[in-house]
Amino acid sequence: MLYYSTNHTAARATLREAVVRGLAEDRGLYMPEVIKQLPASFWDEIADLTFQEVAYRVADAFFGEDVSAEDLRRIVYDTLSFDTPLVRVEDNIYALELFHGPTLAFKDVGARFMARLLQYFIKADKRTNEAVNVLVATSGDTGSAVANGFLGVEGIHVYVLYPKGKVSPIQECQFTTLGRNITAVEVDGVFDDCQRLVKSAFMDADLNAHMRLTSANSINVARFLPQAFYYFWAYAQLRKARVVGGLSSDSNLTAADSNLVVAVPSGNFGNICSALFGHVMGLPITRFIAANNANDVFYNYLQTGIYTPQPSLPTIANAMDVGDPSNFARILDLYSREDVQQRLNQRGISQPLPSLGGVMGGSFIYGATYSDEQIADTMRDCYARTAYVLDPHGACGYRALKEQLQQGEVGIFLETAHPAKFKNTVDNILHLDLPIPEKLQAFMRGQKQSIPLSNKFDDFKAFLLSQ
């Protein structure tokens, strides 16, 4: 399968080229030319499949033309060595717990898959002696998931750029204590500065002549597409529990037939973007809610139809502190495609653009935005009533469901990271002494190793050229 750029001026790329480059030459994000519809047999069997089996079927639709069945199955099964269980929090509201992987965050899925796929391409590449350098900007969990996913992988070196003082101490430990083929770069700025430095590096001729560069942020197709796996698995778990019904015999479930709503805590929008790809492939979700913290660029777009990036604001849900989400371009491109429009019309969904949803209605993507005070209140309320401990990001998704779920609907919100990764915040809000899982304690015992840098591209370029 070939991949095109969202800016539509770069040449088409193969999967290998798209994964290794990360970003297209015209600074656009890669999109697959074809988004396959999953067959009726998949939906007939999904309630009886394991997580790995569900994920392999989805992965085959994405990558089966470019990776052999045996290798793809190995990559998927090795990636998913842990579960993403669906946990009932209260009537009709479930948490999809994505924090059971090695770094206790949802990005373990995409990062581990990408590490294995990239290594597969490197081994198949004749230029085996030329290392690939992975650049990744993080506001918290991406850095730890990518660093640990690539740790010790031969032929790959990872540079993690993170904003100084704006990630939790536990998150910082997870990518600054590893050493080996992982280098942490502490940027004097905010996440958007880190993301800008990464994107600028890809466009710099001197750097590209000096080293092979790719990205492990959700701008990389091998990072964000595999995140669709756990949305299908969440639906499968509801089917197993007979909480929701199955598809009709012709596999065309309309919006009116579905009662499933999914709320996604959203920062750079890779997570919800992967869910939207799943939706186009046939996943029966009636609507999505993009739950923001005070960084409300997407929410404002839903209200006005105008996209206005803003400097990011620091919040207690720091992994969502993004003022110019990269994957917004993918969402716009996805719903401008004729094939996608036709599929939505067949399923009874109309008018996905220009506003997509919001208070204007008439669509299936809605928004929500919450202040730190509202997030804290939500955590306290949920814990008092249900004894379930929300992390600040999951609290946004949970509150969005509480406010927008309608009678007869079933809601899923994503718990994107273990609450202990934000222990100080959670303890202060809930008056707890939250136990720290052993996986996190092991990171905390390590020695911090990081390179301090300004947020100026010239300084970052000089650092990379010295490597």
Image (tube, grey):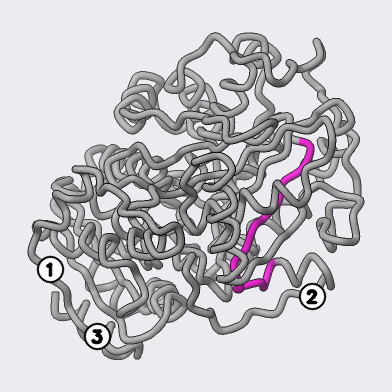
Q: Secondary structure at mark 3?
A: strand
Residue 455, percent from left and from top: 35, 87
Residue 171, percent from left and from top: 29, 61
Mark 2 or mark 1: whose residue is earlier in sequence: 2
244 vs 274, left or right, is: right
The correct choice, above or below, for 467 with respect to 54 in the image is: below
Mark 1 residue type:
Lys
Give the CA distance from mark 3 to mark 1.
16 Å
370 vs 179, left or right, is: right
Write down the quadrant of residue 446 in the picture: bottom left
Give the CA distance from mark 3 to mark 2.
34 Å
* Magenta span contains residue 290: yes
> Badge 1: few (under 14), some or many (20 or more) residues near its Cα, within 10 Å?
some
Mark 3 residue type:
Leu
**What's the mark number on residue 453?**
3
Residue 83, percent from left and from top: 39, 28
Query: Which residue shows up at 32% across the image and 51% down it?
Result: 434
Q: Secondary structure at mark 2?
A: loop
Magenta stretch: give its range.
286-298
Name the foreground residue: 59 vs 67.
Answer: 59
The correct choice, above or below, for 431 with respect to 437 in the image is: below
> Badge 3: few (under 14), some or many (20 or more) residues near its Cα, within 10 Å?
some
Write down the quadrant of residue 84 in the picture: top left
Residue at image mark 2: 306
Residue at image mark 1: 448
